[in-house]
Amino acid sequence: MTDPSKPGPPADGAAPTEAPAARAVVGQDPTVQPGGPAGPGAADPSPPLAPTADGTSAPAPFLRRLATAIRHHPWMYAFIAPGLAFFVLFHYVPLLGNVIAFQDYSPYLGVTGSRWVGLQNFTAILRDPEILGAITNTLIISFLQLAFAFPAPIALAIFLNSLLSERVKRWIQTVVYLPHFLSWVIVIALWQQVLGGAGSLAHGLSLLGVENVNLMSDPSFFKVLVVLQVIWKDVGWGTIIFFAAISTISAELYESAAVDGAGAWRRIWHVTLPGLLPVTVMLLILQLGNVLTVGFEQLLLQQPAVGAGAAQVIDTFVYFRGIAGGDWGVSTAVGLVKGVVGTVLVLGANRVAKRLGTDGLF
């Protein structure tokens, strides 16, 4: 006699009964029905489904899924909200003002009352010799910063990492970090006291018979001076991220290289620099996005001493032409072109970096 409560063998041609263990998925309770909760109080990880007109189920709208996520993780979204609000209010909403680039804008008439001029402001840029000079100065300063200011934190981080004394290393780090927290007004004043006409350098050279030395007002030396100021102010701050990258390099790689007979320089070349390559590529791509932005406040403060021919860049042009001169349409068009060029450079550099075998930025 067989127990009628137990299933018997399948009949001929009938499919065998699938056991619960055969339906089990890795990491899922086999007793749970598909689509059911994984346990008491557990939420379904799949997105909620909403009925459609034909009776089938489709993913719920984005706002409904967002409301569900906020209800399940309120504190996480509470921490995200301030940063998100900052970017929306001060970065994305102001993008709507780019419509001024296509208008003969007047603050008294507003965006809705100003006359529409199409691409007239953009054609005016191409015929303006002042903007061409500003673009030239901007590109020269950007190239010098990429060539000298960008690799300076890398060199300093490698040098400090090679020091054996932790006390000396921390003292140097503290000294080179401090200028980053000074405003450009204080930085320019300090450099004026050293390299200006009445500064320490001019006074020392006057004792040697060399008079009228004022590097702060020399237009031919100004672009080099700008790069030196950037290096002095931000080289210490830039080493922070490279120190973090160096700390992730395995010590076994250095030990293996030393066993193979590699000296200090060869260990830097074959171990440290390849370890810094991903971070370096990421920062370089971001730097290319700011290639037309070279420091508004720094150049604005020094422009009266050297003249607009040497210190006029795109940002100062937008300030003097738009805010001071009232030509809002042309200045907005310049800013819009600068943003588009920066975006194209970032996307292009990221694609080139990926084709060369690195991870890129995104």
Image (cartoon, helix red, strand yellow):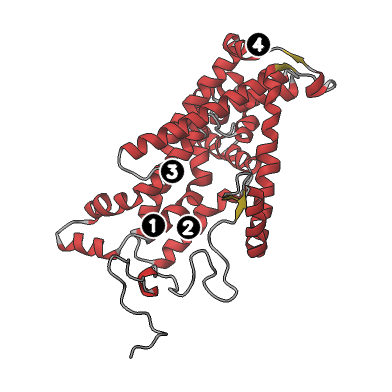
> Does 333 appear above or below 276?
above
The amino acid sitting under disc 2 is Gln
User: What residue is shown at x 65% (from left), y 39% (from top)?
Assistant: 91
In depth, the one of 231 and 198 nearer the eye is: 231
Q: Are marks 1 and 3 in contact (CB under 8 Å)?
A: no
Q: CA distance from mark 2 to mark 3?
A: 28 Å
Image vertical order of residue 243 relative to residue 285, above or below: below
Query: Mark number for residue 173?
Result: 2
Label pair 1/2, CB-CB below 8 angstroms = yes
Specify the quadrant that holds the N terminus: bottom left
Disc 3 marks a residue whose amino acid type is: Leu
Q: Position of residue 354 (x, y in %)?
A: 35, 39
Distance between mark 4 and mark 2 Cα atoms = 52 Å
What is the secondary structure assignment of the residue under circle 1?
helix
Q: Amino acid at mark 1?
A: Leu
Depth check: 197 or 24 in front?
Answer: 24
Alpha carbon of mark 3 to alpha carbon of mark 4: how far?
36 Å
| Secondary structure type for disc 3 | loop
Number of the label disc, if any, that sits on residue 270: none
**Residue located beneath label 4 in the image:** 120
Q: Is residue 318 above or below residue 27?
A: above
* Inter-mark Cα distance, 1 to 3: 27 Å
Circle 3 sits on which residue?
Answer: 361
Q: Which residue is mark 1?
A: 160
Foreground of the two, 108 or 301? 108
Q: Residue furthest left?
A: 260
Q: At which x and y percent is residue 121?
A: 65, 14
Q: Nearer the viewer, mark 4 or mark 1?
A: 4
- Number of the front mark, 4 or 2: 4
